Image: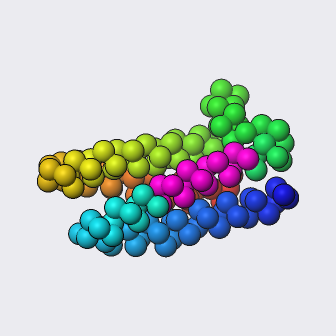
């Protein structure tokens, strides 16, 4: 497949997640039966997006996005590249923390403040990743 087509698909998937799925999931936070599957869907779609970006990078110039990210830190990437990598990794970690704290909250009713604090950090990181992706 054409790398340009796949790149457009990755940006489209990223946009759908950022502008439709996540906001809907956040509005449903008081309805766990809706909130949990929506947020898990966003996570799976984000992981799919990361894999698609990695594949497109390898098709385009032989190096994967992960390798390029490591090069940005070790080989003199721009501040914007470094910031994008940091917030992108933070958003993926935010999903993991949300799954753990959300599971505890759902099962035992414990940890609401930690889950909310993570949500604030996650939303900042995910949208910062989305916005900076346009310059990557």
Q: Is residue 114 above or below residue 135?
A: above
Q: Is residue 86 rendered to the left or right of residue 119?
A: right
Answer above or below: position of 128 versus 21. Answer: above
User: Residue 109, position in %: x, y?
Assistant: 14, 53
Q: Quick one: 121 or 64, which is closer to the camera?
A: 64
Residue 107 coordinates in the image, percent (x, y): 19, 52
Relative to 69, 83 lies left or right = left
Is residue 83 visible in the rendered image? The answer is no
Magenta highlight on residue 93: no
- Determine the residue located farthest toward the left in the rendered image: 109
Left or right: 16 as drawn, with respect to 10: left
Name above or below for residue 46 compared with residue 64: below
Where does the image place residue 3, in percent across and percent down from the top left? 82, 55
Residue 45 figure quarter? bottom right
Quadrant the N terminus occupies: bottom right
Toward the viewer: 119 or 34?
Answer: 34
- Identify the image's colour scheme: rainbow, by chain, secondary structure or one colour: rainbow
Residue at 68 percent of width and 56 percent of height: 135
Q: Is residue 14 visible?
A: yes
Residue 118, position as x, y percentages in the image: 31, 50
Residue depicted at x 33% and y 70%: 34
- Residue at 51% x, 55% y: name it: 44
Give 33 or 50, whichever is nearer the viewer.
33
Tell me where residue 116 sits by quadrant: bottom left
Task: Tell which residue pokes out farthest to the top in this image.
Answer: 74
Count of marks, rendered view:
0
Give the extent of the magenta segment: 42-55
**Left or right: where does residue 20 sit relative to residue 81?**
left
Q: Residue at x 25, y 70 (%)?
A: 31
Provide the major secondary structure of the magenta segment: helix
């Amino acid at each position: 497949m054409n790398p340009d087509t796949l790149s457009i698909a990755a940006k489209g998937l990223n946009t759908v997640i950022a502008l439709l799925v996540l906001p809907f999931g956040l509005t449903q936070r008081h309805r766990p039966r809706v909130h949990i599957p929506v947020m898990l869907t966003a996570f799976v779609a984000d992981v799919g997006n990361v894999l698609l970006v990695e594949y497109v990078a390898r098709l385009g110039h032989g190096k994967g996005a992960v390798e390029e990210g490591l090069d940005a830190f070790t080989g003199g990437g721009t501040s914007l590249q470094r910031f994008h990598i940091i917030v992108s990794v933070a958003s993926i970690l935010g999903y993991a923390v949300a799954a753990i704290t959300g599971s505890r909250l759902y099962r035992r009713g414990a940890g609401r403040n930690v889950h909310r604090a993570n949500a604030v950090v996650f939303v900042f990181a995910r949208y910062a990743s989305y916005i900076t992706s346009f310059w990557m």
